[in-house]
């Protein structure tokens, strides 16, 4: 079994390699690895996780702090990134664009176009903040951390709300409102770093059970399995 953390990015591309033209389009990454999707609709599906560095938000409870650490950032050209994907899982079709925040990445449509031409099935998870939603995605998860325009919420294939042990009245109203109008709404208990939060999980579970099927529970399987 893989033990977290598992971050092979640094072993795939030499950061001291000067062959990449300085004018090339670069993508800021902090992780590139293979695991199962642990959240939402595609839980259990093997995927390549392409985790971008950086996010315009600063959530105090963020459970992916690597995207804020300057030591984890590595800027890859499109060719370098495609080579790295071929090295770790050349035949795996599913790719998740995550972060950090993918919408904050310059030239994201260029990468999406290149991956689609390679026959990849592309999912993206986003807070909905940072830029326009690109075309070409096969699945879009919006996990709102602040109020978003209705058109962004409605563009999602699934909505995933992160809830703590004591959700505010305003968050409860927002979630219940979208549960009544969106067909695929998930509650995900807030974690304590790499560890599940038992109180948040109990709150989310009771809320889902009381929703009469309008909400679903996402429990971050990878944290329970201790894999990335």
Image: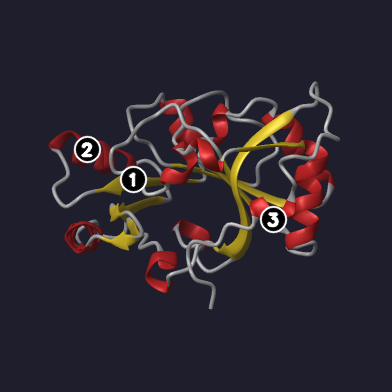
Considering the numbered disc 2 on the image, is that residue within a helix, a strand or a loop?
A: helix
Q: Is 3 drawn above or below residue 102 in the view shown?
A: below
Please name the colour scheme applied to the rendered image: secondary structure
Say which residue label 3 marks: 11
Of marks 3 and 2, the one in the foreground: 3
Asked whether 159 or 73 is in front, the reply is 73
Q: Is residue 190 left or right of residue 118?
A: left
Seen as rendered, the residue at the extreme bottom is: 1
Q: Are marks 2 and 1 in contact (CB under 8 Å)?
A: yes
Image coords of residue 208 (percent x, y): 25, 59
Residue 190: which disc? Answer: none
Image coords of residue 16 (percent x, y): 74, 39
3D distance between C-alphas at marks 1 and 3: 34 Å
User: Which callout, 2 or 1, points at the residue further toward the start of the chain?
Assistant: 1
Q: Residues within 10 Å of mark 1 (few under 14, many from 20)?
A: many
Q: Residues within 10 Å of mark 2 (few under 14, many from 20)?
A: some
Q: Is 91 drawn above or below residue 50 in the view shown?
A: below
Can I make out residue 120 in this image? no
User: Which callout, 1 or 3, points at the residue further toward the start of the chain?
Assistant: 3
Q: Residue at x 43, y 51 (%)?
A: 184
Q: Is residue 220 left or right of residue 190?
A: right
Say which residue label 2 marks: 171
Q: Residues within 10 Å of mark 3 (few under 14, many from 20)?
A: few
3D distance between C-alphas at marks 2 and 1: 9 Å
């Amino acid at each position: 079994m893989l033990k977290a953390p598992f971050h092979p990015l640094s072993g795939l591309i030499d950061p001291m390699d000067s062959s990449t033209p300085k004018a090339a389009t670069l993508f800021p990454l902090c992780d590139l690895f293979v695991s199962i999707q642990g959240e939402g609709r595609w839980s259990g599906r093997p995927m390549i996780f392409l985790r971008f560095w950086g996010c315009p938000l600063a959530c105090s409870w963020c459970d992916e702090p690597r995207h804020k650490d300057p030591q984890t950032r590595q800027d890859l050209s499109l060719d370098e990134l495609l080579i790295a994907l071929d090295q770790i899982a050349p035949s795996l079709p599913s790719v998740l664009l995550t972060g950090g925040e993918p919408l904050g990445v310059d030239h994201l449509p260029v990468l999406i176009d290149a991956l689609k031409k390679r026959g990849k099935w592309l999912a993206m998870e986003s807070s909905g903040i940072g830029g326009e939603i690109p075309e070409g995605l096969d699945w879009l998860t919006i996990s709102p951390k602040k109020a978003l325009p209705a058109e962004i919420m409605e563009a999602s294939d699934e909505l995933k709300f992160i809830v703590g042990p004591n959700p505010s009245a305003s968050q409860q109203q927002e979630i219940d409102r979208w549960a009544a109008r969106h067909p695929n709404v998930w509650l995900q208990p807030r974690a304590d770093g790499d560890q599940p939060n038992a109180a948040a999980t109990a709150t989310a579970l009771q809320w889902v059970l009381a929703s009469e099927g309008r909400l679903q529970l996402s429990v971050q399987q990878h944290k329970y399995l201790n894999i990335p």
